[in-house]
Image (cartoon, rainbow, N blue to C red):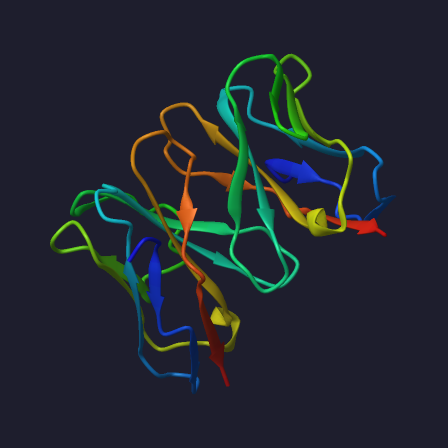
Amino acid sequence: QKEVEQNSGPLSVPEGAIASLNCTYSDRGSQSFFWYRQYSGKSPELIMSIYSNGDKEDGRFTAQLNKASQYVSLLIRDSQPSDSATYLCAVTAGSARQLTFGSGTQLTVLP
Amino acid sequence: GAGVSQTPSNKVTEKGKYVELRCDPISGHTALYWYRQSLGQGPEFLIYFQGTGAADDSGLPNDRFFAVRPEGSVSTLKIQRTERGDSAVYLCASSKSRTGELFFGEGSRLTVL
């Protein structure tokens, strides 16, 4: 079983809609959770971090964390074609400094 | 420079050859990470440095892989006796403090023929 699971997609949404991206993780000791965005041919860039249960909002992005269900999600409101990218969920566990990444969900926002 | 710099951006080599990949982190970032990414996959952890020492090298796949960071800044990933399965994009990232908040370079694409 992979430690961080994501639906690979592709996920397509129309412009202006809400895109919902989901991630589950296997290690109950996981403490820090991140969403990275990766455009085709480019390197990942951090867009959201969340450390405690609940919601965290930053502009059009909302990260949601539920540690009991071992589930983290990313909502993108008012999706734009420029949001089309692969979204990587990443997790750290315990004292480890390394990030464990999921395989990513490819999002396409249709004009 | 303002970001993480990696060289070369592309490297094509033959099976069995030795390869070095270089990473220059963001100034002031004490933590440095190497990951590799294959097509359609997320980045896979290789090694983490805090300062000059390798704090966690548990992701290195075998003893053909080695990395150094002698002065606590620039790091070099070294791959001996390359194999076709080593072909991937090798990503370097640095971090100032908060765990997991990484800044990635543009990567070095390694192709082993």
Relative side of B69 to B106, left or right:
left
Looking at the image, residue A6 lies above or below residue B13: above
Query: Which residue lies at the image location 69% right of the left edge and 16% below the top edge?
Result: A69
Q: Residue furthest left?
A: B71
> Which percent across, then down, holds residue A49?
52, 28
> Which percent across, then down, holds residue B93?
38, 50
> Which percent across, then down, holds residue A9?
79, 48
How many numbered callouts? 0
Q: Quadrant of residue A59?
A: top right
Looking at the image, residue A59 lies above or below residue B113: above
> Which percent across, then down, holds residue B95?
33, 40
Quarter of the N terminus of chain A within the rendering: top right
Looking at the image, residue A5 lies above or below residue B74: above
Relative side of B102 to B18, left or right:
right
Decide which of A81, B91 is in the foreground and name it: A81
Looking at the image, residue B21 lies above or below residue B41: below
Query: Which residue lies at the image location 70% right of the left edge and 39% below the top edge?
Result: A6
Residue A53 seen in the figure: yes
Relative side of B110 to A87, left or right:
left
Query: Which residue lies at the image location 51% right of the left edge and 77% below the top edge?
Result: B84
Decide which of B105, B55 is in the foreground and name it: B105
Query: Which residue lies at the image location 35% right of the left edge and 77% below the top edge?
Result: B81
Residue A10 seen in the figure: no
